Image: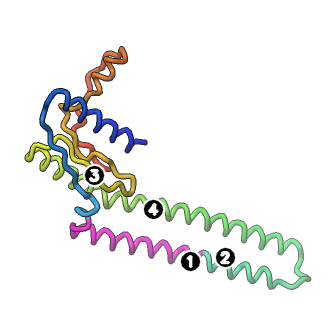
Amino acid sequence: MRTLLSLILCLTLVAVNAQEHTTQKIGYADTDYIMSQMPAVKTIESELKTHSAQLDNQLKAKYEDIQTKYKAYQGMPATTPEAIKADKERELTSLQENFQKFQQEAQSSLQKKQAELLDPIYKKIGAATEEVAKENGYSFIINPHLTNGGDVLLYTDEKFNISDLVLKKMGITPTAQTPTTPVKKN
């Protein structure tokens, strides 16, 4: 949805400026390609693989523990008292719940680690994109490949922001806001 709105905004801006006979440059920057060329990203990928492997090993160990205890439960003689069977069943249920909880925490941990490591990279790419756009007179820089929920627009020139005009058209008086020059990937 955000991508569609960004694309509509971009096309609207282009149409408005075509009416004003203003020359503008639109470029694109392939963030996937840029990242593939950055040595820091290779280090981050390695760090994420290591973190993922550690979590996988912990998951496997917990799973094997559950399997071992389940086999022991199944191997209990028929003469085993019901109280002991019930206790083992509660233990297995608790282990299973803890395993599922750990799976969720592991996934969350991996996502948090990825965001923590990649955020500075995205900021660096965003800053460099903004500088290049300004230095070369670009009005918009578009990301041609939308992977991992990336943004369509990497940079927009604020002079093409028609948000206040849209608000006025709708009968709303806009309040002062801080500029939102570069559109950066989260």
- Numbered mark located on residue 60 in the image: 1
- Give the foreground label among 1 and 3: 3
SS at badge 1 = helix
63 relative to 185, above or below: below
Please report the residue visible at 50 percent of the width from the left and 65 percent of the height from the top: 106
136 or 185, nearer to the observer: 136
Tag 2 and tag 3, C-beta contact below 8 Å: no
**Residue pointed to by mark 2:** 66
Please report the residue visible at 55 percent of the width from the left and 73 percent of the height from the top: 59
Horizontally, is 86 left or right of 106 in the view?
right
Horizontally, is 108 left or right of 177 in the view?
right
Tag 1 and tag 3, C-beta contact below 8 Å: no
Q: Looking at the picture, how far across and down is residue 128, in whole percent?
A: 16, 52
How crowded pointer 3 is (Cα within 10 Å; few <14, some 14-19, many 20+) is rated as some
Label 2 – label 3 distance at C-alpha: 47 Å
Number of residue marks: 4
Q: Amino acid at mark 1?
A: Lys
Q: Earlier in the sequence, mark 3 or mark 4?
A: 4
- Numbered mark located on residue 109 in the image: 4
Tag 2 and tag 1, C-beta contact below 8 Å: no
User: Split into 4 quadrants, where in the image is the N terminus?
Assistant: top left
Range of residues picked out in magenta: 36-62
Q: Amino acid at mark 4?
A: Ser
How crowded pointer 2 is (Cα within 10 Å; few <14, some 14-19, many 20+) is rated as some
**Residue pointed to by mark 3:** 143
